[in-house]
Image: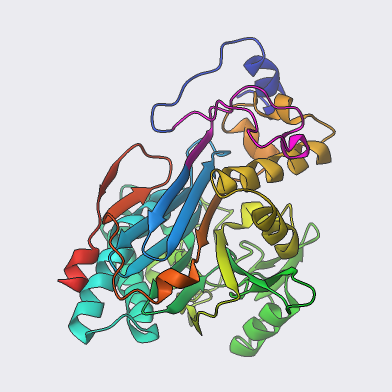
Amino acid sequence: MFSWLARMALFCLRPMRRYGRMNRDDDDDNNGDHDDIDGDSSGDSLLWSRELERHSFGDFSMAVVQANEVIEDHTQVETGNGAVFVGVYDGHGGPEASRFISEHLFPHLMRLSREKGSISEDTLRAAFFATEEGFLTLVRRTCGLKPLIAAVGSCCLVGVIWQGTLLIANVGDSRAVLGSMGNSRSNKIVAEQLTSDHNAALEEVRQELRSLHPDDSHIVVLKNGVWRVKGIIQVSRSIGDAYLKRPEFSLDPSFPRFHIPERLQRPVLSAEPCVYTRVLQTRDKFVIFASDGLWEHMSNQQAVEIVNKHPRPGIARRLVRRAMNIAAKKREMRYDDLKKVERGVRRFFHDDITVVVIFIDNELLMVEKATVPELSIKGFSHTVGPSKFSIFFS
C-alpha cells in the first residue's frame, strides 16, 4: 500500500479525474475578494454548490467540498409554502449513517408533525429517535456480513423555520450560528451560536460524561493530545455508532480500533438531541448551518462577517473556499495547489465541509404562505425533486 506522501506525489503525474455526482466549481471569485481564494482562477472538481435558491422567507445558498475517499457529509434543503427545512449530516466511519439520515429523518418529521398537527420540539426529538432506531435496525440486519457498520455514525443538525419560528435540533459538533444586527448605533453584525457542541474537547461535555458514568474511569481519555470518549471518538452524541450504545453490537478484538474490553452496562453515546426554539426578530438576518469542517478554520464571528459583507449568490461556496484557503496556509501551501489534491489524500489537509446559509427576509415572515417551489435539494447531487412538505401542509 502506498503511503499518503507517495499518493500525493502520484496525483501530480496523472490527469485530474472528474466526478459525476457534483457540479464543478470552475469560476474565479466574481466579487473580487482574492483573499478568499489566494488567486484562484481554475476550478476545484471536489467542490459542489448551489449559488442561490428561494425559500418561503428569503434565499439560501449551499456548498459541499469532499476530502474523504468517499464523501461522508450529506446535506439537504427542503422548501415548501410556509416552511423550510435544513439538514447537515456529518458522518464518520463511513457514509452509511449520514446517507440514511438524509433519506429518513425528514420523512419521519413530516409524518410525526402531521399526526400532531404542528412542527415542534417534541416532533423533532421523535424524528431523531425514529431515525436512530431505523439505522440500528439496519445495523442489526447487516452486521453479520459487514461488522464495521456498527462503528459507523453521524452528527446530525437540522433546522426548521415555520410560522415565524426557528427550531433547531442537533447531536454532535456541527453548528448553527445566527447572524443578527447589534444595537442601532453600532450597526454591527453579531454572531450567536444556537447549538451546543457535543465534543469531548469541551470541559462541560467531559463533566457530563463523567457524571453519567461515575464508575468508569476511562469514559474520557486524553489520547495524543485529544480528548476522546473511551479513547476512541470525539463526539458524545450521534446517530449510529451502535457499538457504543448496545452490547449486541460490540466489536471483537479483531477490530482493535473499536474494541472495548468490558461489556457495556449502559450506552456510552446518546442520540438525544439538544433542541432550541427562537421566535425570529427583525434584527435576525441569516443562519449558517455547517459541519465542523468549517468551524475548525474560522470563528463564529468571522463566518457571519463574511456572509454580511458579500452578496448572497455563492456565499456558502465563499465560506467553504475561505476555510480551504486557511487550511492550505496552515500547511504553507497555496489554495491553487490544494485544489489539485485528490479525494482521500485531501483528508490530510481538511475534512469534508458542508455549509448552508439561510437568509431571512423579515417582510416575508409576515406573509401567511409565500409561494415558492416545493423542492428537495441534496448536496453533492445534480438531482432536484419535489419536497415532501406537502405531506404535512396538505
Q: Residue at (64%, 64%) from the top-left corner?
A: 234
Residue 20 locus on image (x, y percent): 39, 27
The residue that appears at 17% across and 68% down in the rendered structure is: 391
Of all residues shown, which one is farthest toward the left?
394
From the top left corner, tell me how far across and down residue 278 is, in percent: 51, 83
Residue farthest along the right direction in this orientation = 332
- Looking at the figure, which quarter contains the C terminus? bottom left
Picture quadrant of residue 195: bottom right
Does any portion of residue 96 appear in the rendered image? yes
Residue located 55% across and 67% down the image:
172
Q: Main secondary structure of the magenta part?
A: loop
Q: Which residue is rendered at x = 44% and y = 31% of the image?
A: 23
In the rendered image, residue 142 lying in the magenta stretch gets the answer: no
Depth check: give the residue in front, 59 or 245. 59
- Above or below, 76 relative to 229: above
Residue span colored magenta: 23-50
Q: Quadrant of residue 233?
A: bottom right
Query: Is residue 153 in view?
Result: no
